[in-house]
Amino acid sequence: MIWAVILAAGESRRMGSQKLILPFGTNTVIEAIVKTALDSSVDETLVVLGAAEDDVRRILKSYPVRLTVNEDYRSGMLSSVQAAFSALPLEVAAAVVMLGDQPSIPVSVIEDILKAYRQTGKGIVIPVNEGRRGHPLLVDMKHRSMVLGLDPEAGLRHLVRSHPRDVLEVEVSTPAILKDLDEPEDYAA
């Protein structure tokens, strides 16, 4: 089983308001990324809640996703990854870690990552556009214990640096993998 993990626990400090609940097309930012995960061939989707837990929970109540709460969300993104990896059932083989503020990621990126994982067995699959690594990335659960033990300052980059032979970069045609909504200007664009 491969699950999508959507990190939706952040405080949106740089945005000035909670970016996950901002309008995006006919939905909200968080709905757009959830729909992308649900439209992909992942088996299940887990959303990590935090700062805007009540709002995001309300928005997602009609979606077939599982929810978990990162009580330590103020510690940064790695704490949300760790909360997700702790919540994933033991039978999960891998997780596609998606950022809740990347609503423009197309389903094709997830499918390219999944295909590469299935064909190569590499434990860390990262999309790349014009030489730059982006998100989402796939992490095989053979790395679960290391992820759970990572120092918050190190982040997932330490996992990638620690296992260079287990990393596969997959070239994708969209620069959306490099763009998230951190500042009001990002959202306006």
Image: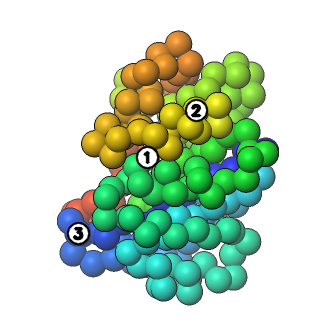
Question: 101 or 186: which is nearer to us?
Answer: 101
Residue 4's place in the image compared with 70, above or below, is above
State the image coordinates of residue 126 (x, y, percent, origin top left).
Answer: 51, 31
Report the residue marked by disc 2. Answer: 143
User: Which dot, 3 or 2, sits closer to the camera?
Assistant: 2
Secondary structure beneath label 3: loop
Question: 90 or 67: which is nearer to us?
Answer: 90
Q: Dot 3, crowdedness within 10 Å: few (<14), some or many (≥20)?
A: few
Q: Earlier in the sequence, mark 3 or mark 2?
A: 3
- Residue located 43% across and 21% down the image: 162
Asked where in the image residue 101 lies, by quadrant, the reply is bottom left
Indicate left or right for 9 with 140 as reference: left
State the image coordinates of residue 136 (x, y, percent, origin top left).
Answer: 51, 44
Q: What is the three-letter code of the residue carrying label 2?
A: His
Residue 31 visible in the current orientation: yes
Report the residue marked by disc 1. Answer: 176
Q: Dot 2, crowdedness within 10 Å: few (<14), some or many (≥20)?
A: some
- Residue located 47% across and 66% down the image: 70
